[in-house]
Every structure is written in C-alpha cells, then in structure tokens.
Amino acid sequence: MNKLVHMMPYGKTEVTRSEQFVWDWQYRRLEGFMAKLADCISHADSGNQRRLVKAFPDEAQAIIDFQSKEGYWESVERKVEARKAHNEAVREAKKMLEEL
C-alpha cells in the first residue's frame, strides 16, 4: 500500500477540524446545533466572537479566519479538494488491487 500512496499525485492531505467546520458551514452541510453555532459566530461582533472562541475555539476561530484572513477560504478549499482527490485515488487503487 505504501508504494501506491507514493504513486498518487496528491500525497497525504490533512484537513483540520476547524477547516472542515468552515467548509461544511459554507456548503450548508451543518445541521442542528452546529448550524446555529456557525450562524451565531458569523453574525457576532468582534467582542462576542472573542467570547465564543473561549467556548468553541476551533469553530469560532475558523469563522473569524474566514472573515478576516486573506486567502484563508481558498486555502481551505484547496485542501478539502486535494483530500477528496486523494481519497478517490486510494479507492481506485484498492479497486485495481482487488481486480488483480
């Protein structure tokens, strides 16, 4: 399996919990409490966002970074897409091995 991973063009791609949260928020994949939390963080002023960071550090910081860091969203999208491509390549490699 290690040889197959080296053959794959994308390598191993790690997406952090924060990045996955903001990606899910942007593509409306969150439900229930997490969807409401994301909406709350995104609509809060900076003082209340700082308070939310104390209770929900990963989630709040991800949305703050989305709103304020140049290039953050593009970076998250690239990482998530690279991970998807990597996972697809792994599935294809496994399928090829099963056919042998």
Image: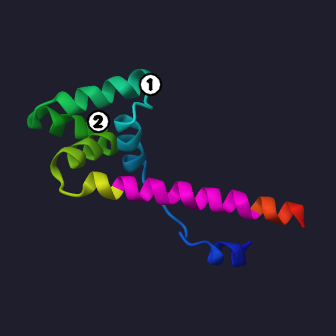
Q: Residues within 10 Å of mark 1 (few under 14, many from 20)?
A: few
Magenta-tinted stretch: 76-93
Count of picture labels: 2
Q: Residues within 10 Å of mark 2 (few under 14, many from 20)?
A: few
Residue 67 appears in the figure? yes
Q: Main secondary structure of the magenta part?
A: helix
Q: Position of residue 64 (x, y in %)?
A: 21, 44
User: Type of residue at label 1?
Assistant: Glu
Q: Which residue is mark 2?
A: 55
- For the residues marked 1 and 2, what is the alpha-carbon distance in whole angstroms? 19 Å
Quadrant into which the N terminus falls:
bottom right
- Relative to 95, is 56 on the left or the right? left
Q: Nearer the viewer, residue 100 or 37?
A: 100
Q: Position of residue 46 (x, y in %)?
A: 10, 37
Residue 40 vertical position relative to residue 15 in the rendered view, above or below:
above
Tell me which residue sits at (24%, 40%) in the image: 53
- Relative to 97, is 47 on the left or the right? left
> Of marks 1 and 2, which one's residue comes earlier in the chain?
1
Q: Which residue is mark 1?
A: 31
Q: Position of residue 61 (x, y in %)?
A: 26, 46
Q: Is residue 92 magenta?
A: yes
User: Type of residue at label 2?
Assistant: Ala
Residue 73's mark?
Answer: none
- Relative to 18, is 44 on the left or the right? left
Q: Position of residue 24 (x, y in %)?
A: 41, 38
SS for dot 2: helix
Tell me which residue sits at (47%, 55%) in the image: 81
Q: Is residue 2 magenta?
A: no
Quadrant into which the C terminus falls:
bottom right
* Tag in front: 1 or 2: 1
Residue 27 vertical position relative to residue 67 in the rendered view, above or below:
above
